[in-house]
Structure formats: C-alpha cells, structure tokens
C-alpha cells in the first residue's frame, strides 16, 4: 500500500489547509532521500519545488484559486522538456541540455498547481525495456534490487512505487509505461495516440509515442490524464478529448453486459507459466463480475513485433538526425572539420542502443530496402489495425499479460538486443494501432509484481479507465 | 574554342527546378515571421525552426492556399490529397537533419508555363510542384576555417516547381524563368524579390548527339535570369569540350560564380547518396476540398499569360510586351486594364500601350530615382489618356505637345475636371486657323527670300526650315499639316 | 550462421548515419543487426496485397494553423543558450564547403 492517499483526497487536504503544499514536498523528499540507492532520479528539483510550494501555500492563505492538483508533487521522466533543471533524455548527448521551452503536458500540470520535484531515469532516448540503457545509471526494482525496474520509464515507475510522489509521467512507444508499471506494481496508462500533446517530449518514434501517467490507482491516473489531454496548438496529430473527460466516471458495480476478449495469440509460447496462470485467474474474476469472456484471435499479432522493430527504428533514425552538436547537445572540441565534428559528436553522444536503432532505421529506409521493409511493415500495420477493429466489433475490451516475464535480473538480457526486444511482444500492438491500454497491478508472483493489460478501441479511454477501476478493486 | 558546327551537332536539353518563397506572414510549420529582408540574425526563429528536441511542425493554412493559387497560375489544379515527407541529409543549416518536403504526393502536378521561342508560343510542361521548408543560410567568411549559420530562413515556405526537360537553348530557359516569375508575381503568391532569394533556380543541363539524353549536371541556386542564361551557356560548352576530347560527363552538383562567370564542382553525386525519404508522422495529410478550389479559382487575378497573349495580339514587340507585363505587376493601378478596355480598338489600345511605355513608365522611374513617391491612379490615367486620345484623333494637337500634355497631366496634383478646356487654355492645342496661319506664313516667306529661292531651285528640304520658323512664331502650336499646305500654296504663287 | 549484413554494408550505414564505429563495434553491429534483420524479415511472408500503408493512426486530415505570428512564451535568445560555438548572433560551425 502506498504511503500517499489518493490525489483527490490530498488536494482537498491542501485546499482546506489541513496539510500544506510544503508538507507534501517534505514528504516527497523524505522518500527521495530514503531511496536514493535505487537510482531513480537523474535530477532532484528541491529548491524549485519548495519555491512553488510556498507560492501555492501563499495563494491558499490569500484565498486564491490553486488548481485541481494544488500542491501535488510529481516526477517526470527526463525526456520531458522542463524549464526547471536539465532535460537529459537519459543520454550523454543531452547531459547538459537546458530546455528553452517546456512540454505542454508539464505546463498543464503546473498550471493546475502540481509541483515538479524531480526528473526520472530512463533508457537513453527511451530505447529499452529495462532502464539498463540509461547513460546515467541502472534503476533497481523497488521489490528486488538485483532486478530491473522495467523500461524505458523505469525511473518513473520506481518513483511512484517508492512513494517519491503520488504520480509520475512516462512516455510509451512500445510498452515503455506499461512494462515498468507492471514490474513496479503501479498503474500505467498508455492513452490513445494523440490524446496528450507530444510537444516538448523528446521524440522517439513519432507515430507511436504517447504520454501517460503512472500512479497508485486508476482514478489518480484518470485525473492526471484529464488535466493533460486535449488539443494543443503545438501538436497537429491530436484527437479530441472525450466530452465527459476522464476524471469523474461512476464506479461500475459489475461487468454485466461487458464483452471481454482474451488474446489467445499472446498466451502461448514464451510466456512465463506463472504469469499465464495469474492472467487466467484475473480473467476468471472478470467472469465472476458478470463479463462475457470470448477468445479472440488477431492473426497478425505475431508479426507486430517485427513491424514494430522496423517502424520504430526507422522513425528513431530520423528523429535522432537533429543531434549534431551544432545547436545543442554533446559536441567534440577536437574535431578538425565539419564531417569529423558530426562523426565525433554523434558517436560519443549516442550509446550502443541508439546507434543500433539508427543503423537499423537507416537500413530499412535506404533505397532498395524501403519497399521490402518499411513499406511492407506499414502495410502489415494496416492489416493489424483492421484486425483490431474487427475484434472490437465483437468485444468491448481485449486483455492479455503486460510482459512475458517477471522483472528479470539486471544484466540478464543485455548481451542480446533481440532477446530484450522480445519482451515488448505484448505491448507493441497498442502503439502500432494507436489504441489505449493500461497495465494494472494484479498481485505478486515469487515476491515480484505482475501486471495485467486491458486494451480498448481507439478513443475509448474513458471506458478503459472505468472498467480498469473495477478490476483494480478486485486486487486491493 | 568549339567551332559552331561542332556546337550545333549537339542537342542541348534543359530542365529547371525553381524554389519560390511564398509570401505568407509566418513560416510553413511555425509561427515565426517569414521575412527574407530581415537582418536580425537568428531572431526570427523558435524551437521548431531550431530543431530542438520535442518540437513539432504545424502546417500554415495560408501556405496551402497560396499553393492552390500558384497551381492556377501554372494552369493546373491542386491535388485533393497531398502529404509531407522527410528528406534526410546532414547540413549545418538543416536543423532537424531532414527537410520536410512532399515526395510521394506533391500538392501540384501537371500544368505548364507558356514562353515565346522564335516568335512562337511554346508550352514548357510542369512535372510537379511541392511545398517544402527552406533551410537556414550559411555564410563562409573568406579565409576562415569556419562557417556561420543563421536560421531565420529555416522553415520559410517554398514551392519547388519542377519543369519537364523541354528547353533546348539558354534563351528558352531564360524565357521560362521570366514567365514563371511573371506567373507567380501576377498570382501574388510570392514577393518574387530575386535579390532576397525569393526565387532561386537550379538548372539541369545535358548535351547529346543522339536522341538519348546525356549525363546531366545541376547548377544550383541561381538568382537571376541572366545567371540562368550564362550558366547554361557555360555548362553547354564545358560539356561539349569534355565530350569532344573523348571524356565523360560526371553527374554532379555545380555552383555558379557570378563575378567570374564560371561554375565549379560543388558535390559529386555518389551512389551512397540516399535521402531515405519517409512519410512525416508529425503531419496529417492535406485534403483540399472542391469548395476551397472553387473559391480560389474564382478570385484569381488575370494571369500574366493571358495578359501577354492579349498584348501580343495587338502586334506589340515581345520586349515591349514584357516591359508592360512587369509594369502591370509592379503597379497596383493596373496600367494594363486600360489597354484591355480598348482591346477591340487596336489603334487606341496600341496608342495607350505606347503612352504607358514611353511617357508613364519613364515618369515613374524618374520619380523613384529622385526618391519621390509619385502615384498615378488608374482613374487619372484613364481620364488623361481618353482626353488625349480624342485630341490626337481629331488632329487638335501635335505629337510633341501631346507627349508634354500627357506628362504634365499625369503628374499634376490638381484635379482638372475639363481636360480639353485646360489643354486649350494652357496652349497645348494646335492652331489650325487657316487665316491666322496664312498671315504668319506670308511674313516668314517674306523674311527669308534666300530660302524661298532655294526651294524654287528644287531644294525641297529647305521647306523644313520655314516650318521651323513658323513653329517658333506660334510657340509650336501651328498645325504642321496646314502650315505645309499654306507654304506650298504660297511658293506655287511665286512660280 | 552467416551474417545477413556484410561489413561493408555496416560501414555504409554508419557513414550515412554519421557514426564512427570501432572494429569491435562493427563486428558486434554486424552480428546484432543481422539477427534483428533476420527476425523482422518474417514480414516477407505476410500477404498484404495492395493494402494502404498506415504511417499515422488518427485518421486526421488537414490540421492547419492560421497564418498569425505566434508568441511561444520564451525569450528567443534562450535558443542560443545551448549553442556551443557562436559569433555574434550566428551559430558557428567548422567550415563546410570548399568553394573553388
């Protein structure tokens, strides 16, 4: 159980003067101090956080409006550009980068009175499933320090699990919110593509990237999503927010009349037996709540990982072209000419995984290979989207495990990138199709957390949160 | 030196890519000012143009509208579906490491530009035209081992217009560029200021003795029509010289040194050259509706091409025509619309054209040189020209006086309600009064017996002297026809 | 198992990507990229007929901005604060072009 009450309770306490924003910041830093050895935060924004808390507390004393998240401390993955502190993306490339502008999602949270207390560790440029690719440090799993916290939002997930703040932000390109949420026993929401502005978040793969919250419970996540979502004049790929928002749904009493599809294709090879059994138990509990359980097959889902590992590196190679050491970022003083400057700045600033993805992306986009790889992948992606649409014409939600494995040992998969890539097998389909998905904690196996994934049709985020909340209640 | 005969045995083929900077207020993908005349380095930029992490493009509606309008100026209609792609290459003035352009689905396809070649109208077809973001500007201080980058231009909206390789002489290429310039200028989609690089030409040139095209080179970033012409002349000779010596043309990008009038190798195109085009996932596709097309089509001004064909139908010289077209584009008062009103009366229309060319434009030019801001409104022009024309055809004024009168009236700040009366009062009209003139003629003849004697001896040229004297007496107002008649009458009496 | 990508291909990709690789890195890349490319090559068996590509998933069209100057809420000079080399307001880079 978290040491933090739910966010709406906290906000009420702050607004009524029962606790101050400063008390909450004190509390956040007490857990940050206590858990520093988990390597969770790249930067701590103590001074700025206390200044903000004072500002909010003064406003409350003066009877001014302080917003829907008054005094709530939070932590952002360090690929969110923030006016406060550095924004490193976990990379040597941006180790000293100070953002001249701020992510829209951060600004929206701050405008509602939230307080940024730190920036969380991640795989450099969000490339990874374990946070082992961070150029700073490896975040340890809060439940077992020899194991990974998941990735790439490993710092964000561990921060919430370790009570450093009631919520954190992550980004999810192929499972980067859901996998660490599952490994760290927190709720991780991957909204529909385009629901939250990507402006000011270091791009990984632009057609797949989404921003979402990691929280102790579904309703906290729903509130944060409600604050962050909705069109932004700085991102032209955004969808409209649900007319009823996300923060105020009626809790369901049961799941009568709800059809839930089980993705059998994901329940077979490579899946840890104990996770398989736990997943089946969760499904049984849904049935008990009155849901109709249907077996669903998405024939192309076993190709989704191959599609992902073409589309994602292609976009990565493109998005990382801007890092040339000229306007910002790592640069090499010893370069003798422009070509040398490019080569040295990039080779030193990027880690092995970024280089690998740049090279794969360059390969699949290069002339002669484009049609066979990139174009073909985008066609199979269409097929996958169509198959999901068809599935959702038969059921309201689809469920699966989040990860085929329990949190694995640090170093266990680092020798073999392909093996690491395979851990995304359950999660990438939601990114390729743009649909919302959530990772819910469903207890422990061998003293390690395990998550359960629910997916909903594109733009059905509100419905997803509503059904997630009743599932969550079964495991409290 | 290449002999003309050898030169003529090669067929030259030219295709041109032209970058037109659209005159939107803000950039193609960001809200920074799009102004090529600025000199505040790196101030008209923002996180998007600067290519900061997490920055996203957002398409400017006006750029789409201007592309639609440029389409009509190029005799084509914008595509219903177009979209943006990323073109990857590393260059310091390309902040994102890719240029956002349209590769697979350009906003314009087809169309043509009409040129006059050997007195004939010839169509140069347009392959495609696409929207793209401009790069920043790099300067290379002489002798320094570094370059300087200004990103003010980064993200400026460009329309790249690609012609078919259908030109075969440098003169045709120059004509094409000029007519493209007029087309864009008349459509008001660009400021087309060549000095500020609002139009930049890349010329692809190849030569061949057979029907197969030879290997081409591309000379990039030419910013005047003359440079287009000269660089092609230079390149044709360079290529023929190489081929005549048994060499091979290398596919390459060349730069033009305008001061030295030579081109030089900039970059050799290698097989490794690979732009890795991909759809830009940050920008949803552009769909243009029938309504948008229609509303733009309806509001297009008269095109340069239509104007030119009208002027040519009057029998005007190409050079005159081109100057009038430039004037039309330069002045809001639309000098050509007055010619157009008279288009069915050839003499009147040609007379107006002549007056614009020889009276109005020099006046405007002089005023500009003097730093004055002379404005001739279309109403003033119309009033003056109509009155002057009626004086002309009724023979009430001689041509010298007519020119003076028109000039005076065009620059007059006073409103003159009755021009005919004013012309009369101001002494511009001809004296055609037989009796009055007869008196003067007689007196002049009497004063010049020697001249009269010469005339009687057959020196008919000497009549001119007498006419001149009479003009002097009458302050130039005497009707020369009547004066001539009276002189020969008087002389005949002496025979 | 033979590598799908040759050393030359690895070097060519590195050049295009502006990356320098040590000999050891080239070996590793060759092995790793080959196994990844082999893995994704299973797509070649997928039947897609003439399916459209999905490079975006929102179905959005013509999302346009009005042509008005935008105040982005920060001082433009801040953009230069991360620039490593500058001269006046210019960004300075090693010489890029040899003009003959």
Image (spheres, grey):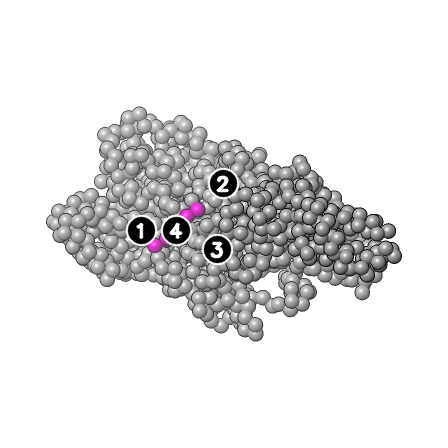
Q: Which disc, if any, is residue B285? A: 2
x, y percentage for residue A208?
43, 45
Is the C-beta separation of discs 3 and 1 under 8 Å? no
Q: How far is the residue under mark 1 from the one under mark 2? A: 28 Å
Q: Mark number for residue A106?
A: 1
Residue B442 visible? The answer is: yes
Q: Position of residue B150 (x, y in %)?
A: 48, 62
Q: In the rendered image, which residue does mark 4 sit on?
A: C70
The chain to which mark 4 is attached is: C
Q: Nearer the viewer, residue B441 or A299?
A: B441
Which quarter of the rendering shows the N terminus of chain B? bottom right
Residue to which mark 3 is pinned: B35
Mark 1 or 2, which is nearer the eye? 2
Q: Quadrant of residue A248?
A: top left
Spatial separation of the CA atoms under disc 2 and disc 4: 23 Å
- Classify B116 as above or below C78: above
Provide residue B54's location: percent of width, then percent of height: 41, 53
Q: Secondary structure at mark 1?
A: helix
Task: Residue at the far right: name it.
Answer: B457
């Amino acid at each position: 159980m978290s040491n933090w009450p739910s966010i709406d309770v906290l906000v009420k306490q702050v607004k009524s003067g029962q606790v101050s924003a400063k008390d909450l910041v004190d509390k956040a830093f007490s857990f940050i101090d206590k858990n520093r050895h988990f390597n969770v935060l790249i930067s701590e924004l103590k001074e700025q956080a206390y200044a903000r808390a004072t500002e909010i507390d003064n406003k409350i004393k003066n009877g001014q409006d302080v917003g829907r998240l008054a005094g709530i401390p939070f932590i952002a993955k360090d690929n969110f550009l923030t006016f406060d502190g550095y924004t490193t993306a976990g990379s040597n490339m941006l180790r000293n980068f100070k953002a001249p502008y701020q992510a829209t999602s951060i600004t929206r949270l701050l405008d509602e009175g939230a307080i940024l207390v730190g920036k969380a560790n991640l795989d450099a440029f969000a490339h990874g499933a374990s946070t082992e690719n961070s150029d700073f440090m490896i975040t340890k799993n809060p439940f077992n320090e020899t194991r990974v916290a998941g990735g790439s939002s490993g710092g964000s997930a561990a921060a919430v699990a370790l009570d450093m703040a009631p919520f954190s932000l992550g980004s999810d390109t192929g499972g980067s919110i859901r996998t660490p949420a599952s490994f760290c026993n927190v709720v991780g929401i991957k909204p529909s593509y385009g629901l939250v502005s990507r402006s000011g978040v270091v791009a990984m793969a632009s057609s797949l990237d989404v921003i979402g919250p990691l929280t102790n419970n579904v309703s906290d996540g729903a509130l944060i999503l409600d604050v962050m979502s909705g069109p932004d004049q700085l991102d032209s790929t955004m969808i409209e927010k649900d007319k009823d928002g996300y923060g105020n749904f009626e809790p369901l009493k049961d799941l009568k009349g709800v059809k839930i599809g089980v993705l059998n294709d994901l329940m077979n090879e490579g899946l840890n037996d104990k996770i398989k059994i736990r997943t089946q138990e969760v499904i049984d509990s849904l049935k008990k709540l009155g849901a109709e359980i249907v077996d669903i097959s998405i024939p192309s889902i076993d190709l989704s990982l191959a599609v992902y590992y073409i589309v994602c590196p292609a976009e990565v190679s493109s998005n990382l072209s801007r890092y040339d050491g000229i306007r910002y970022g790592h640069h090499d003083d010893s370069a003798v000419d422009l070509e040398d400057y490019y080569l040295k700045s990039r080779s030193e600033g990027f880690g092995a995984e970024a280089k690998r993805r740049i090279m794969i992306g360059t390969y699949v986009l290069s002339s002669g290979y484009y049609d066979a790889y990139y174009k073909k992948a985008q066609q199979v992606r269409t097929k996958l989207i169509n198959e999901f649409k068809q599935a959702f014409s038969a059921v309201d939600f689809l469920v699966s495990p989040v990860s085929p494995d329990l949190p694995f040992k640090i170093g266990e998969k680092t020798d073999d990138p392909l093996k690491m890539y395979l851990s995304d097998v359950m999660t990438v389909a939601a990114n390729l199709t743009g649909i919302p998905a959530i990772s819910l904690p469903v207890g422990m196996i061998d003293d390690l957390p395990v998550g359960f994934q629910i997916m909903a049709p594109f733009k059905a985020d509100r419905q997803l949160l509503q059904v997630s909340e009743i599932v969550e209640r079964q495991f409290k | 030196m290449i002999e003309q005969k050898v030169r003529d045995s090669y067929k030259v083929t030219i295709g041109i890519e032209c970058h037109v900077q659209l005159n939107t207020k803000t950039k193609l993908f960001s809200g920074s000012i799009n102004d090529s005349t600025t000199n505040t380095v790196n101030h008209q930029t923002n996180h998007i143009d600067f290519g900061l992490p997490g920055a996203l493009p957002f398409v400017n509606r006006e750029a789409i509208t201007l592309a639609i309008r440029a389409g009509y100026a190029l005799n084509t209609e914008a595509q219903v579906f177009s979209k943006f792609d990323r073109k990857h290459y590393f260059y310091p003035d390309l902040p994102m490491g890719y240029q956002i352009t349209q590769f697979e689905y350009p906003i314009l396809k087809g169309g043509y530009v009409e040129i006059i070649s050997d007195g004939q109208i010839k169509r140069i077809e347009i392959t495609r035209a696409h929207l793209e973001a401009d790069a920043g500007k790099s300067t290379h201080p002489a002798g320094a081992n570094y370059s300087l980058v200004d990103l003010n231009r980064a993200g400026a909206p460009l329309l790249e217009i690609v012609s078919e390789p259908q030109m075969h002489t440098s003169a045709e290429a120059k004509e094409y560029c000029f007519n493209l310039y007029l087309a864009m200028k008349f459509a008001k989609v660009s400021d087309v200021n060549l000095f500020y690089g609002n139009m930049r030409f890349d010329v692809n040139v190849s030569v061949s003795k057979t029907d197969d095209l030879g290997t081409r080179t591309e000379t990039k970033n030419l910013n005047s029509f003359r440079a287009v012409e000269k660089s092609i002349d230079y390149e044709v000779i360079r290529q023929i010289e190489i081929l005549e010596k048994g060499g091979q043309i290398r596919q390459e990008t060349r730069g033009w040194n305008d001061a030295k009038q030579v081109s030089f190798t900039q970059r050799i195109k290698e097989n490794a050259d690979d732009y890795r085009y991909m759809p830009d996932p940050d920008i949803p596709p552009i769909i243009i509706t029938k309504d948008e097309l229609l509303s733009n089509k309806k509001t297009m001004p008269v095109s340069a091409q239509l104007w030119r064909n009208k002027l040519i139908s009057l029998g005007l010289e190409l050079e005159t025509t081109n100057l009038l077209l430039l004037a039309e584009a330069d002045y809001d008062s639309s000098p050509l619309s007055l010619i157009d009103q008279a288009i069915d009366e050839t003499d009147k229309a040609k007379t107006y054209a002549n007056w614009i060319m020889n009276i109005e434009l020099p006046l405007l030019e002089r005023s500009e040189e003097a730093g004055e801001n002379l404005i001739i409104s279309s109403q003033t022009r119309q009033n003056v020209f109509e009155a002057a024309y009626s004086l002309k055809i009724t023979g009430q004024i001689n041509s010298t006086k007519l020119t003076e009168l028109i000039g005076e009236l065009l620059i007059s700040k006073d409103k003159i309600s009755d021009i005919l009366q004013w012309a009369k009062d101001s002494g511009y009209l001809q004296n055609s009064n037989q009796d009055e003139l007869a008196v003067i003629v007689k007196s002049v003849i009497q004063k010049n017996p020697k001249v009269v004697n010469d005339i009687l001896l057959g020196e008919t040229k000497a009549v001119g002297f007498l006419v001149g004297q009479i003009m002097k007496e009458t302050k130039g107002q005497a009707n020369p026809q009547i004066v001539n008649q009276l002189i020969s009458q008087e002389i005949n009496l002496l025979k | 198992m033979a590598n799908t990508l040759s050393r030359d291909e690895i070097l060519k990709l590195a050049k295009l990507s502006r990356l320098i690789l040590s000999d050891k890195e080239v070996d590793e890349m060759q092995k790793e990229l080959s196994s990844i490319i082999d893995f994704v090559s299973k797509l070649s068996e997928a039947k897609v007929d003439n399916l459209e590509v999905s490079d975006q998933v929102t179905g959005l069209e013509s999302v346009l901005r009005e042509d008005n100057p935008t105040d982005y809420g920060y001082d433009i000079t801040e953009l230069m604060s991360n620039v490593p080399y500058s001269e006046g307001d210019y960004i300075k880079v090693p010489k890029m072009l040899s003009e003959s």
